[in-house]
């Protein structure tokens, strides 16, 4: 997540913004807080990553060991549309809504 994105989120919701979750590396509970001090954005308690549409957190200890978010791979989902495979992330909103309504067939029960 860029500092600009984080600052915009903070301004939209409240002056201080907290992220609660689990550390991506060690799995411990972590709370990362953002606030403004002397006109600068301050992040404490760990690190915040947003490589795609999901937010990942790291605790201070893991961030001190390795500042890079590793073991993350964005997964693309493909589905058949009009006779050929296309990644779902490229579909329009109506087609994504229709995809969520689809039901998978269980061939063992047929």
Image (cartoon, rainbow, N blue to C red):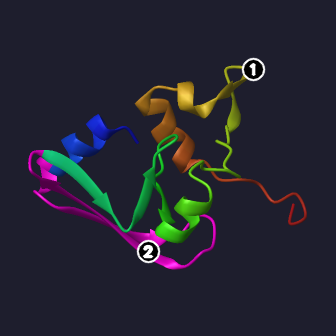
Q: Residue at x 55, y 25 (%)?
A: 90
Residue furthest toward the right?
Answer: 108
| Residue 27 location, quadrant | bottom right
In this picture, is 15 found above or below 3? Answer: below
Of the numbered discs 2 and 1, the one sitting upstream in the chain is: 2
Q: Are marks 2 and 1 in contact (CB under 8 Å)?
A: no
* In the image: residue 110, left or right of residue 48: right
Of 24 and 35, nearer the camera is 35
For residue 7, the mark is none
Q: Which x, y percent locates residue 110? A: 87, 60
- Name which quarter of the figure residue 32 lies in: bottom left
The residue depicted at 46 percent of the width and 26 percent of the height is 92
Q: Which sits in the foreground, 42 or 8?
A: 42
Q: Residues within 10 Å of mark 2 (few under 14, many from 20)?
A: some
Residue drawn at (53%, 48%) of the image: 100
Is residue 95 rendered to the left or right of residue 32? right
Residue 40 image offset from top left, x and y in percent: 17, 45
Number of residue marks:
2
Pointer 1: what residue?
84
- Magenta extent: 11-39
The residue that mark 2 highlights is 30
Q: Position of residue 2 (x, y in %)?
A: 37, 37
């Amino acid at each position: 997540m860029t500092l600009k994105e984080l600052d915009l989120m903070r301004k939209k919701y409240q002056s201080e913004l907290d992220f609660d979750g689990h550390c991506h590396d060690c799995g411990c509970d972590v709370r990362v807080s953002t606030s403004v001090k002397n006109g600068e954005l301050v992040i404490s308690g760990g690190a915040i990553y947003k490589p795609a549409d999901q937010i990942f957190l790291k605790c201070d200890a893991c961030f001190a060991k390795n500042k890079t978010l590793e073991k993350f791979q964005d997964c693309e989902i493909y589905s058949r549309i009009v006779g050929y495979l296309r990644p779902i992330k490229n579909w329009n909103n109506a087609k994504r809504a229709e995809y969520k309504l689809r039901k998978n067939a269980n061939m063992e029960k047929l």
